[in-house]
Image (cartoon, rainbow, N blue to C red):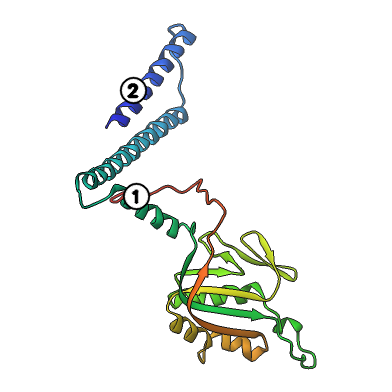
Amino acid sequence: MKWRTIAFFFLCVAVGLFIVVQSKITNGLQLYVSAKTITDYQTTIASEIEDTARIEKLVQETEKKLAEYEEVLNDDDKDIKDKLLDELNYYKLIGSKTRVKGEGVVVIVDDGTRDLYEGEDPNSVLVHDMDLLTIINDLNRSGAEVLAVNGQRVTNTTSISCSGYTVRINGQFFARPFEIRAIGDSKRMAAALIGPDGYGTLLQDYGVIFKVTIRDELTIPLYPEDQNYKYTTKVSEGE
């Protein structure tokens, strides 16, 4: 409420100054205002009202969070530090800002070494970006929670693309062989890749080297770069 009052105050001041300036300029004469100008002002006012509503919701969320902290402070059985650390660790986990471990699979993919058939395209035994993307998609479909390719954490902004004889991942270039690590239900992920219709089985049939190893525990590194969101904002409940 406080933010909305402040925003309306400045908006009223701005409109008042505009009227005073226009009165001075026109020296009491009527000034023609185009329909487009009126529409622009209406759009600006509507935008200010939306911003005010958004800020008000943000204040409400912050007050709710503050109330939770105060509740923890008044409870002798709870520690505010532990709660803050739990939240920090959670946001680090979902933001790919911490190393993680768990059961999963390690997939090795490499160019084939068999002799080519007469007239065969050599690309049929080479690893391409589409192969890596298909394997990652199959792992995600079978429940992978966290993935990495050659030590590069796969995030929501990761791109994988061929660049000559190398593959570009997170802006860095890597040559074969490729190692994909995935944390999740190891047996389910392995079965999805090397089953009768699995993509790993298809690559093996073409002569590409493809190996899957089930691990009781493996580690996946964090994503070291900052993720900046310029066009994205949080949508509150009910919005």
Residue drawn at the location 45% of the way across and 14% of the way down: 22
CB of mark 1 within 8 Å of CB of mark 2? no
Label 2, on which residue? 9
Kind of residue at disc 2? Phe
Q: Is residue 118 left or right of residue 174?
A: right
Whole-percent x, y for residue 67 in the image:
23, 43
Q: Who is closer to the viewer here, 237 or 209?
A: 209
- Residue drawn 34% across the image and 49% down it: 84
Where does label 1 land, which residue? Answer: 84
In the picture, measured across the screen, residue 17 lies left or right of residue 224, that is left
**Circle nearer the N terminus (1, 2):** 2
Element at badge 2?
A: helix
Q: Locate residue 186, reporting x and y percent.
A: 45, 80
Residue nearer the viewer, 183 or 45: 183
The label shown at residue 163 is: none
Instruction: Find numbered disc 1 in the image and state the secondary structure of the residue it sits on.
Output: helix
Q: Position of residue 38 (x, y in %)?
A: 42, 28
Q: Residues within 10 Å of mark 2 (few under 14, many from 20)?
A: few
**Image quadrant assignment for residue 33:** top left
Query: What is the crowding at mark 1: few (fewer than 14 residues within 10 Å), some, or many (at least 20)?
Result: few
Front label number (1 vs 2): 1
Q: Callout 1, which amino acid?
A: Leu
Q: Which x, y percent locates residue 184?
A: 44, 75
Q: Nearer the viewer, residue 205 or 152?
A: 152
Q: Is residue 225 above or below residue 103?
A: above
Most extreme residue toward the front, as rendered? 76
Residue sitting at 44 percent across and 56 percent down?
92
Q: Quadrant of the N terminus?
A: top left
Nearer-the-camera pick, 122 or 28:
122
